[in-house]
Image (cartoon, rainbow, N blue to C red):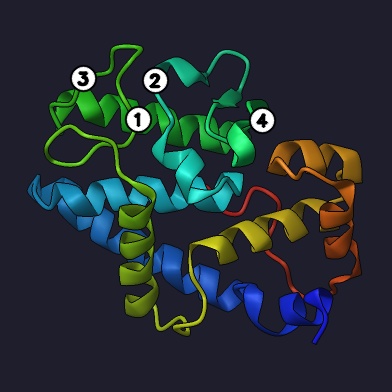
Amino acid sequence: MSFTQTLESSKFLKPSQVDRLVAILSSAYKEAIMEKKSFTTIRDYFIILTLIQTGIRRAELSAIKIEDINLNSNQLTIVNGKGGKLRVIDITPDTRNLIDKFLELKVSLLNEPIDPESYLFMTTHFRSYNPNSVYKRVKHWFKKAGIPDHLATHSLRHTHCSTLLEAGLPVHKVMEQMGHSSIKTTMVYTHVTRSGIPDIKFYNC
């Protein structure tokens, strides 16, 4: 089976699966906010929505520090890209608002530091989430949403990349945004056809 065929058959989340995942997360998040408990659920909500809206790798997400976020220019610096490469990605206004809201909650509810050297996403012990922890939390919510077991964190990345191309973003720009080392990797997604791909903004959060 070719890489393209593999992507077509098993690597993407269907729109209905993303809808269900976001709905379940949103409901749990709102309940946690109202009751001011289950801080893990609150973090999970922002972690998974950030993955959905940016398509970054779990290792890249784990390494984000406050100083890597520029809400004025709607950009995010990825310092732990594949192969140790650094890149700057654009984020949508929705993602900017998402991160801004989480920064607010880090102070008002989670009692977490937001100094430049602090990590954006922390454990209850104020340590950064490691990639395996991110994977486990994503799988936890995938299971709750009834998403097949073979889909995991990287499926969100595949889905996001294809969505960018479907929205008409130039291939070279998608390559830069996703951090692909070769344009050939990005070009694979141009051959993948999926109906009903979610809107480029994914969701207002």
Gap in angstroms between the C-alphas marked 1 and 3: 9 Å
The disc labelled 2 sits on which kind of residue?
Ile
Q: Where is residue 4, by image quadrant?
A: bottom right
Q: Residues within 10 Å of mark 3 (few under 14, many from 20)?
A: some
Q: Which residue is mark 2?
A: 66
Quadrant of the snapshot with the N terminus: bottom right
Cα–Cα gap, marks 1 and 4: 16 Å
Q: Is residue 91 left or right of residue 96?
A: right
Q: Nearer the viewer, residue 104 or 124?
A: 124
Q: Position of residue 204 (x, y in %)?
A: 52, 47
Pick whichever, 96 or 63, lies toward us: 63
Asked where in the image residue 15 lies, by quadrant, the reply is bottom right
Question: How many discs mark residues in the rendered view?
Answer: 4
The residue identified by callout 4 is: 89
Residue 95's spot in the image, x, y percent?
53, 37
Q: Is residue 112 visible?
A: yes
The residue carrying mark 1 is 120
